[in-house]
Image: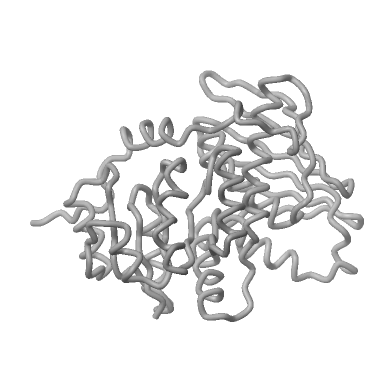
Amino acid sequence: MIRIGAVNIDTSHPMGFAEVMAKSKRAGYVAVYDDSFRPDEEVEGFMERFGVKTHCSTLEELADLCDIGFIHSCNWDLHLEQAIPFLKRGKPVFIDKPIVGNLQDCLRLEQLCSDGGVILGASSARYCYEIQEFLAVPVEERGEIVQVFGTSGVDAFNYGIHVVEAIGGLLGQGASCVRYAGAAVWGSDSCESYFVGYEDGKSAIYNTYTGVWQPFTITVMTTKTTYQFTIDSSRLYEALINEICNYMEDVPHRLASPGALIESVKIMLAGKASKEQNRAVGLNELSSETFFIGKEFYDTYSAGAGSMYRIERK
């Protein structure tokens, strides 16, 4: 069994992943390190529920006990520092979405991987079965992809990155520029649209809806016809965990390259810059002046998270 070390249990993902792994028995959490907002009783509840044996006091201790680290911190500004102890030991790290949130961290991630580090990620939507099934249809039958349209809800970046990564799973790398197209406003909620141009002439449009959960719905226009599907969220974690296990077991897998993961972040950074500057922004124009702040998201998320892992005793 693949031994996984969990870094923080901020979100519902550690629970969802553990439930999937309990069924397949290919992998499982064996230890946890947590210095985030979840109290000890929640960490203990997570450990008891999923048979996690060790509560580590340092990241180094955790890295020594596992085959791969899973970083679940909702403050993405901490992700790369949390990955270092695993990388120093020659162990791969899966970083939950969003993998990073600014250009400097994109460049640092590139360097860490260039130096031999293995960083996997990030959104389960990239590996969903619906995309796998679409791509399995021969190009001669479905046609060449011309444009992809995708929707997401809840917030602009933490959830919006899901649909951008899903688009990346279909189109691959090659995005060149992003143009903010506008917004529809309903009360305090906002639905924004962004146009992404690609070097080979293809394009994508991604929509983010803040304040309301929306399904990940994908429309693919090809040279032959138009396809539409809604990603089944109940199967997302399974699809992701299967690919990570395939990688760890050294069998064929669909995990994206670091460059592909970084491109998704750069697309969203360019979209933010385009909105601020009211013009199309190239991915090669990005600067440190555009960023998504992980600490701000952490503060908001932790304040409203509520108890998730605590086991109630009768």
Q: Is residue 98 visible?
A: yes
Residue 284, given in percent of the width and then of the height, sits at: 75, 38
- In the picture, which quadrant includes the N terminus? bottom left
- Residue ID at (39%, 48%): 73
Residue 212, given in percent of the width and then of the height, sits at: 51, 34
Q: Is residue 133 left or right of residue 309?
A: right
Q: Splitting the image into 4 quarters, where does residue 4 fall?
A: bottom left
Q: How did the renderer colour the structure? A: one colour
In the image, residue 9 above or below residue 50: above
- Residue ID at (82%, 53%): 226
Residue 67, given in percent of the width and then of the height, sits at: 41, 73
In the image, residue 276 above or below residue 34: above
- Residue ID at (77%, 39%): 196
- Residue ID at (33%, 52%): 8
Q: Is residue 180 left or right of residue 233?
A: right
Q: Is residue 23 visible?
A: no
